[in-house]
Image: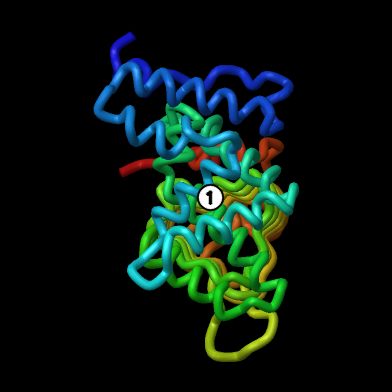
Amino acid sequence: MPTSELRCSPAPPLPAEADHEEWVWPQIKAEARRDAEAEPALASYLYSTILSHSSLERSLSFHLANKLCSSTLLSTLLYDLFLNTFSTDPSLRSATVADLRAARFRDPACVSFSHCLLNYKGFLACQAHRVANKLWTESRRPLALALQSRISDVFAVDMHPAAKIGKGILFDHATGVVVGETAVIGNNVSILHHVTLGGTGKVGGDRHPKIGDGVLIGAGATILGNVRIGEGAKIGAGSLVLIDVPPRTTVVGNPARLVGGKDTPATHEDVPGESMDHTSFISDYII
């Protein structure tokens, strides 16, 4: 099959066991073997990052450590930190698998699980953030903040380590994403590049957005303040959201307004965070 056809082909249907690392990790290794055979120039890289490891958490820890290390923050230190965290917390491993699935089956540009593991900086930033958040909750805050800084430097994704993030998260492209300290992101949420979940000034306390399950946030959207984005809502690209958004509605514009109006807003039944449907609300578009 030509490469262009491979890249454009939709992801195959999910087997029932695809929620589990016991299925995903052998699949990743099989993909890496295939790619090493097809492209010998990558064989050494694929061996060191995937094929030489006995588990997903070891491969991910190795890869993150080498991505985020510096001359003063050594890869060996980071590897031990990541591996210990992932190995001792099953919920983090479950979230990693859910995030892999989110990228593979929501993004048509994602050709394989191994491609996401190695190359999707949104996925990698999210997994590193989970470790930083764990450190934060364990009162290891200087290390959590140092890790946040490296994530921001390397991946151009700036998430405060106190921010709470669910699973099944897709940071698509991810460049320029900012997530504030008291922000909360639910499960099965998709967020595109240059999205800000920010505060509105220098007042402390609970001051950042709360994003419900299944939400889709378009590129360049800004959501400010302790506002709630309801389950299954859709935030149009470039929107500025300053007030709560009801569940399963769509807001667009600057400042954002409900499609259909605030009295009779249009609603939808799908889960946009999973369907990635950005434009179905447009009924009459004329240039």
Instruction: Indicate the amino acid at tag 1.
Output: Ser
Residue located 27% across and 23% down the image: 40
Image quadrant where residue 152 sits = bottom left
Horizontal arrangement in the rendering, residue 194 relative to residue 214 (left or right): left
Q: What residue is drawn where x is 45% and y is 61%?
A: 177
Quarter of the rendering occupied by the N terminus: top left
Q: Nearer the viewer, residue 156 or 273?
A: 156
* Residue 128 occupies quadrant: bottom right
Question: Where does the image place residue 252, in percent across and percent down from the top left?
Answer: 51, 56
Q: Can residue 30 be seen?
A: yes
Figure coloring? rainbow
Q: Is residue 249 visible?
A: no
Q: Nearer the viewer, residue 167 or 250?
A: 167
Q: What x and y, as percent, mark residue 9?
A: 43, 18
Residue 233 lies, with reference to residue 255, above or below; the image says above
The residue under label 1 is 61
Q: Considering only vertical position in the picture, is 278 above or below 251? A: above
Q: In the current view of this chain or complex, which residue is farthest to the top?
A: 1
SS of the residue at dot 1?
helix
Q: Residue at x 63, y 88 (%)?
A: 204
In the picture, the quarter occupied by the C terminus is: top left
Furthest residue to the left? 41
Going 54% across and 90% down the picture, which residue do you hit? 202
- Residue 243 lies in quadrant: bottom right
The spot of residue 214 in percent (x, y) is 67, 46
Q: Residues within 10 Å of mark 1 (few under 14, many from 20)?
A: many
